[in-house]
Amino acid sequence: MKLRSLVIVLFGLTITLPGLAKNKRGKRPMKLISYNIEYGMRADTTTNKSVFAAWIRSQNPDIVCLQEANKFTQKSLEALAASYGHPYAVLQKEKGFPTAITSKYPIVNIMRVEDNMWHGFVMGIVDGYHIISLHLSPHRYESRQRDIDLILETIRQSGPFEKWIIMGDFNSVSPVDAEKYADGRLVEYLRKAEEKRPQLKNLVNGKIDYSVHQRILDFGFIDSARLDKNFSETSFGTRIDFIYISPDLKSAFTGGNFIIDDFTRKYSDHRPLYITWEK
């Protein structure tokens, strides 16, 4: 009897371990962060990026998707992830501007794509969710269109359109934010940039290109930030970082927005995004 009681207590402990605890509704809260860390978080000059790791720990996400994980190797990314409590990590590539995924849970069915793309993307399944961390071209709209078409076709050929979360630095703006750019300042900025650097091609016949995000929306994805009641257009300048979810996840959504604090104001030229939901 004593042995049996001990086993019951031990099993009771296992279902309340961090990351597995359920809320009062019997659901398990989940949190994901997407963050362009600007040249591999070069602003954090501490050993092993300890300031960055401490910030991630304070946020306690289940999944982190990174862009611009420059100068990381698979091993060094694994070490960083372990320092903030993620035993699983996948780096897309070890050169250029890689994307990455780290997680509290195993990352399976991993796909690293670089061929025929600007930077590429990394994809994996985490706890039943299809996760894509991407980084599109900052220089040419044709490249962004080609890349997003390949990503959407990958999703199309991957089975039912369920439990998908795609995110990253899209380097393009969305038609849902068009009113914010109606004053012409963004067009003028891009026009002057193209005059100085003829290799740039971000305007289409002198107008803002919304096609990348329009294709994502037409596919059926939902802009998660727009679901958050606290979302405000005053919280961002030009919004190019997004987290999109498949329609089946809308009912599970509990929050999502930019994270603006003392750390994120200083350590990257991008602000991270988060999304929370119930599993």
Image: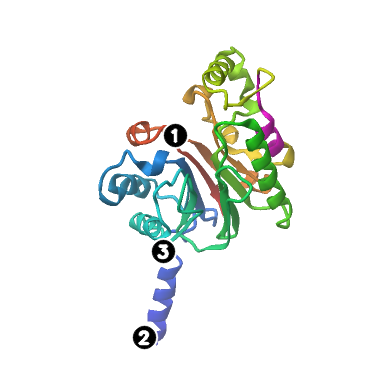
Q: Vertically, is 149 above or below 83?
A: above
Secondary structure of residue under mark 2: helix
Span of residues in magenta: 207-217
Tag of residue 60: none
Tell me the amino acid under the disc marked 2.
Lys
State how far apart marks 1 and 2 are (Cα).
Answer: 54 Å
Tell me the amino acid under the disc marked 3.
Leu
Q: Please name the residue shown 68% across and 46% down the image.
A: 150
Q: Please name the residue shown 64% across and 47% down the image.
A: 116
Q: Vertically, is 250 above or below 23?
A: above
State how far apart marks 1 and 3 are (Cα).
Answer: 31 Å
Mark earlier in primary sequence (2, 3): 2
User: Looking at the picture, how far across and down is residue 149, in whole percent?
Assistant: 70, 43
In front: mark 1 or mark 3?
1
Is 218 positioned to the left or the right of 230 in the image? right
Tell me the amino acid under the disc marked 1.
Arg
Is 158 positioned to the left or the right of 134 in the image? right
Magenta highlight on residue 213: yes
Mark earlier in primary sequence (1, 3): 3
Is 29 positioned to the left or the right of 158 in the image? left
Count of numbered tags:
3
Colouring rule applied to residues: rainbow
Q: Please name the residue shown 27% across and 43% down the image.
A: 45
